[in-house]
Amino acid sequence: MKKSSNKGFVLIESLVAFSVLTTCVFVFLSLQSASLQQTAQLQAKAEVLRVLYEEVQNQQEFLPNTVSYATDRKQTYQLRFWQTNQQQHVQINKGDIQVVIKSED
């Protein structure tokens, strides 16, 4: 009977397949992590815009005047409404997120 000389080849083939599989798993996990971070940032910005919308609805009668205040919801938001020339401005800050909206009459 002949002895098989493929034992070394099977080991190398298994190691290459394992390294390819490991690389694919790490790439998938890094892409998933980046996607989750981006989703969290977008959700935080959407929350800021929702609070801004609600505050604009509450302050509609006072909008021609300059108003600055802080509101506490799950976190603290700094809001500022003001008017220059023919433009109305609104600004909201929460941590490192800042949104400024300008509208013309």
Image (cartoon, rainbow, N blue to C red):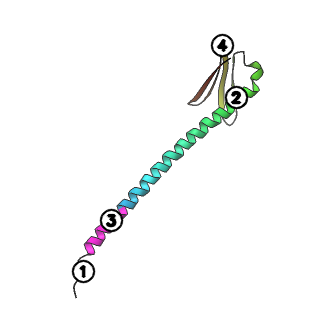
> What is the chief secondary structure element of the magenta stretch?
helix
Circle 4 packing at 10 Å, graded few (<14), some (14-19), many (20+), is: few
Q: What amino acid is at disc 1? A: Ser
Disc marking residue 71? 2
Question: Height in image: 95 above or below 27?
Answer: above
Q: Secondary structure at mark 4?
A: loop
Measure how far apart labels 2 and 1 are at the Cα level. 77 Å
Measure how far apart labels 2 and 4 are at the Cα level. 27 Å
Identify the magenta region: 1-18
Q: Earlier in the sequence, mark 1 or mark 3?
A: 1
What residue sits right under mark 3 in the picture?
Answer: 15
Residues tagged 1 and 4 counted as in contact (Cβ below 8 A): no
The percent position of residue 85, horizontal first and vertical second, equals 64, 11
Where is residue 63, by image quadrant? top right
Disc 2 or disc 4, which is closer to the eye? 4
Disc marking residue 4? 1
What residue sits right under mark 4 in the picture?
Answer: 86
Measure how far apart labels 1 and 3 are at the Cα level. 19 Å
Image-based side of 32 in relation to 101, left or right:
left
Residue at x-position 60% and y-position 40%: 43
Q: Secondary structure at mark 1?
A: loop
